Image (cartoon, grey):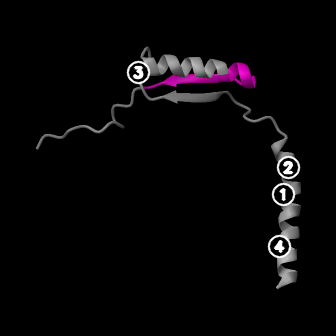
């Protein structure tokens, strides 16, 4: 039982150490798309743009704002 736990711990350690090279890559490689599910020009859109600009300044990554109005996603009343 102790040998199995030791082997499992060693296997986890080897996997964790070998996977670290993938984390060193710059992420994300593409601009980050921020979806704001309200129409453009509203208060949510303005706040989203301000936050995205600050995030861009802090991280050095480009953030693209995609304001959309999703009328199909909102529940609608059906006539009875």
For disc 1, the neighbor class at 10 Å (few under 14, some 14 to 19, many from 20) is few
Q: Between residues 37 and 43, which one lies in front from this camera angle? A: 43
Dot in front, 3 or 4: 4
Is 46 colored magenta in this rendering? Answer: no
User: Which callout, 4 or 2, points at the residue further toward the start of the chain?
Assistant: 4
Q: Which residue is mark 4?
A: 8
Q: Between residues 50 and 23, which one lies in front from this camera angle? A: 50
Q: Which residue is mark 1?
A: 16
Dot in front, 1 or 3: 1
Q: Is residue 3 left or right of residue 49?
A: right
For disc 4, the neighbor class at 10 Å (few under 14, some 14 to 19, many from 20) is few
User: Secondary structure under badge 4?
Assistant: helix
Q: Is residue 52 left or right of residue 7?
A: left
Q: Which residue is mark 3?
A: 39
Residue 65: x and y in percent read: 56, 22
Is 62 colored magenta in this rendering? Answer: yes
Report the Cα–Cα distance between label 3 and label 4: 52 Å
**Which mark identifies residue 30?**
none
Q: Residue at x 70, y 30 (%)?
A: 30
Q: Residue furthest front?
A: 2
Q: Residue at x 71, y 19 (%)?
A: 57
In the picture shown, does residue 14 fall above or below 70?
Answer: below
User: Which callout, 3 or 4, points at the residue further toward the start of the chain?
Assistant: 4
């Amino acid at each position: 039982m102790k040998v199995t736990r030791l082997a499992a711990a060693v296997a986890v350690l080897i996997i964790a150490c070998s996977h670290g090279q993938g984390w060193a890559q710059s992420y994300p490689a593409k601009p980050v798309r921020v979806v704001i599910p309200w129409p453009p020009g509203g208060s949510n859109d303005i706040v989203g743009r301000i936050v995205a600009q600050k995030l861009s300044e802090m991280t050095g990554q480009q953030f693209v704002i995609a304001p959309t109005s999703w009328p199909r996603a909102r529940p609608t009343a059906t006539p009875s």
